[in-house]
Amino acid sequence: MLLCDIGNTSYHFLQNEEEYKKDAKTFDPSSIKEKVFYICVNPAVKLLLEKLDNWINIAAFIDMRNYYETMGIDRIVACEYIHDGVIVDVGSAITVDLVKAGLFEGGFIYPGIKAMSQTYKNISSALDYAFNFELDLGKMPKNSADALSYGYIKTLVCEVNSLGLEVHLTGGDAKKFAKVFPNAKVDERLIFKSMKQIIKKAKLC
Amino acid sequence: MLLCDIGNTSYHFLQNEEEYKKDAKTFDPSSIKEKVFYICVNPAVKLLLEKLDNWINIAAFIDMRNYYETMGIDRIVACEYIHDGVIVDVGSAITVDLVKAGLFEGGFIYPGIKAMSQTYKNISSALDYAFNFELDLGKMPKNSADALSYGYIKTLVCEVNSLGLEVHLTGGDAKKFAKVFPNAKVDERLIFKSMKQIIKKAKLC
């Protein structure tokens, strides 16, 4: 089975146990002839795929009543996977979504590492530091590099932990954030696993 | 008495009860002949002012042992003003500093409104919304605009409130943030008041 999770910058494929990525701007989806089950948040790619019969959008097989209209399909698919917990999906943006008793209870969006790093740099050249994921979150910092890292990381950690539920970390930077969410379940394939479950439930394959 | 708080973008003057600003790039400080008590975080302006005898840097009259070397003088001056509490100074960056029993206990830096708004927009055109300071911080959002506002505002509020001390709000956007820190003391002139206190204590005037 070929699965594809399409974001703003790339097509992310999973075939059996092998993952690979293609650039969203240059990849031609019609070059694939076999059946592909996909989700897509990229508006330009969406238009391309609608014309291709072998690309099957699994969004059509999810009960959307519980979600809101402009919510990214990647967030929805992640929420479908858990019964109780918080999904923290760390990519170019970080999405935090709350699920209770199998129902989506709301969520928020926070900048990813690259975007936030650029933000500090844009404010002042004096704020051009790499984030330190090893910092002590129990202590207010007394140096510039940690003052930025704490501002970026601890504020997020504070809010996520306040939700009081199990944290599921996924997305490209999941391993980095695992350092600051030591009790989180890290599952970089959570989206693909959920896609498989939806496909199975809908008897598509 | 003429006071001046110089940031990355402007000279901010207070003369008696009147405030005014001048562009940091174009204003010529030698055009002022009277005595000016100032603080400055702008490296280029610092060099200019060192040559002018009537511009008096009050940083020289603060006991710096309790602060760290690269800490902005505006943050230090704000901390000097309180005995116990949290200073939240909202400008192009937001600085959050903790003072206990008259001692600086550390602090962090978070992006200001304009910088963070640009960050979301840069991640995706789908994230181009103005922040909503009226949103219900007690409830996870179910729409895109509030999902961004919550991500920006609630994470900060969560961490600041967790410090458990009185919040002093200052800086250009203090009034906006007063909506999300309803118990905070808003004092847009906190820096100037602290400067006056330092000047008085050092018997400079």
Image (cartoon, coloured by chain):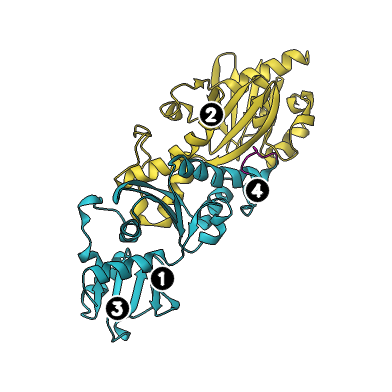
Chain colours: A cyan, B yellow
Helix, strand or loop for the magenta stretch, by majority: loop
Picture coordinates of residue B82, whole percent (x, y): 64, 20
| Residue at horizontal 57 percent and vertical 38 percent from the top | B9
Horizontal relation, residue B185 to residue B13: left or right: left
The reply to whether dot 4 and dot 3 touch (C-beta < 8 Å) is no
Q: Nearer the viewer, mark 3 or mark 2?
A: 3
Badge 1 vs badge 3, beta-carbon distance below 8 Å: no
The CA distance from mark 4 to mark 1 is 31 Å
Residue in view at x 54 percent, y 51 percent: A181
Q: Residues within 10 Å of mark 1 (few under 14, many from 20)?
A: some
Q: Which residue lies under the disc numbered 3?
A: A36
Marker disc for residue B171:
2
Q: Is residue A88 above or below residue B92?
A: below
Query: Disc 3: which chain?
Result: A
Label 2 to label 4, Cα distance in Å? Answer: 28 Å
How far across and down, in percent of the image, does residue B18 sit? 54, 17
* Disc 4 residue type (three-letter): Leu
Chain bearing mark 1: A
Disc 1/disc 3 C-alpha distance (Å):
15 Å
Residue carrying label 4: A135
Q: Nearer the viewer, residue B140 or A143?
A: B140
**Separation (CA) of disc 2 from disc 1:** 41 Å
